[in-house]
Amino acid sequence: MVKDTLLEKEKLEEKNIKTETTEIIKQEEANINTENNLKENTEISQKEHMSTMQIFLIILTIFIAILLISFIGFTVVNSKNDNIISGVYINRFNVSKLNKEQALKTINNRIEENIPEEIKLKYNDYETTISTSDLNISFDVTSAVNNAYKHGRSGNLLENDLTILQTLFSNIEIELNVTLDEETLKTKLEDISSKLPDAVIESSYYIEDSNLILTKGKAGSVVDTEKTSANIIDAIKNLNLIDNYIEISTYQKSPTSLDIDKIHQELYTEPKDAYFTQNPYSIYPSENGIDFAISVDEVKAMLNEDKDEYIVPLKILFPNVTTNMLGNEAFPNLLSTAKTTYSTRDTDRTTNLVLAASKINGMVLMPGETFSYNKTVGERTISAGYKEAPIYVNGQVVDGLGGGICQITTTLYNAVLYANLEIVERSNHQFVPSYAGPSLDATVVYGSIDFKFKNSRNYPIKITCSVSGGIASFQIYGLATENDYQVQLTNRVTKTTSTAIYSEAYKILKKNGQVVSTELLSRDTYKRH
């Protein structure tokens, strides 16, 4: 039994081994078939891939060729274009497809249309203007047009084409540079600042008569010149001025406090004595000084009072040597002299002559300085010592205060003529006076008629005069020069009627006895007695 069992077991094992071997062989055959299939599939895929690559390369070659042809064509077209490329603007104005000349004309026209005669400014309800002509505004149109034309032409061929394409789809704006007189602009804004309705009022001081007037300021608005001028310049650059108000920028400011020490330092002036030099010849006139009539501390104490205005008395500081005190050595030459006669029996009239002459005696005029008879002699009043004496009023002889002083005017007038000085203002009497011929007289009326002349010489002159013994005498001293002339005065009556006398006077200049010129001084009309 056991033996049979073993035999059956061996047979079963052989059978299993055969079965396994068969399975292994099948599996190997299957693997071989699979490998063969994979090889076949791979070869097919490789063939398909090679075909796709070939097609792609063909398409890519065609595409590149098209691009190249397009690029060449695009470049050729652009190279022949003499106009500004599309999409280019100058300060928002389109200059595309325009040549330089057209672009220049276009931009200049736009500037002319957009720069008004006046720039309008506004601050709340306050409005004002600034004239554009005062600012000397200038636009650099040529550079802007050149820059616009260069756009798309300044690189290599590829760069230029790319720039042209980019600009075609995305516009570019060229800046238009502008210049103007910024100092004048700021000056005008500072002037506007002082005119604002709520402008700051600065503390100030001024002299009136013999007093210093101090005023405290008030806080207010001040134009911000930097910010406002920047806004104006920006509006000009952008040509954005037509029907457009530019806001005036301001800030609040308190007034500067009154600095009494500084004011005193600025006001105080030392008197200067007159002096002269002989080589070279020159006269240096005296000058009055000025100072507070009270102490600086007293002035400071004034400011503690709550007032808008403070009055500080002043005093004049006189020099030790005035110009009129300079002696004859400073005025070495007698330039002219003139005399008239008067009646010593009329004491009141004589008094008036003496008073008027005393105001003029010793007076020095610097070159170019003008003498005024009324300003020098002053108003003829009783308090000044003048007396009643005969005068002409409305064609009649009546007594009047200061009567007779026109004889001093006339005598001085003749001395001035002989010195060949410039007459500024002169009027004749109503009647021919007894002390001078027709057209050789001069009258004055305080407040209305004056006698004026100018020192037209290159050096100072000094006037001396006296009234004594029936003679009123004037002398004018100075420095004689080679350019001086001998002066001759002539007068004549040109016509007489039952009511009037007509006359004229001439000044004749001579050099070495020869007549150089003849000048008509005046033509006058007098009433007849």
Image: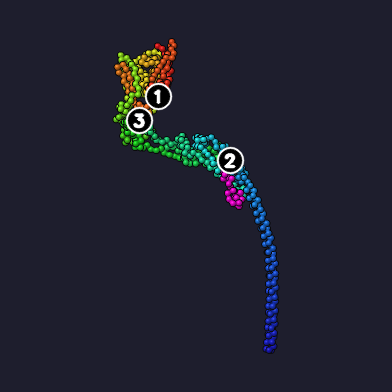
Q: Position of residue 260 (x, y in %)?
A: 35, 36
Q: Is residue 274 magenta?
A: no
Q: Which residues are magenta?
A: 144-164
Compute the Cα span from label 2 to label 1.
Answer: 59 Å
Q: Amino acid at mark 3?
A: Asn
Work out whether residue 179 or residue 5 is closer to the camera in this orientation and state it. 179
Q: Quadrant of residue 347?
A: top left
Q: Amino acid at mark 2?
A: Leu
Q: Earlier in the sequence, mark 2 or mark 3?
A: 2
Q: Of helix, strand and loop, which one carries label 2?
A: helix
Compute the Cα span from label 2 to label 3.
Answer: 64 Å
Q: Earlier in the sequence, mark 2 or mark 1?
A: 2
Dot 1 corresponds to which residue? 422
Q: Quadrant of residue 254?
A: top left
Compute the Cα span from label 3 to label 1.
Answer: 36 Å
Instruction: Identify the disc placed on residue 211.
Output: 3
Work out whether residue 524 or residue 111 is closer to the camera in this orientation and state it. 524
Circle 3 Cα neighbour tier, 10 Å, few/some/many (<14 / 14–19 / ≥20)? some
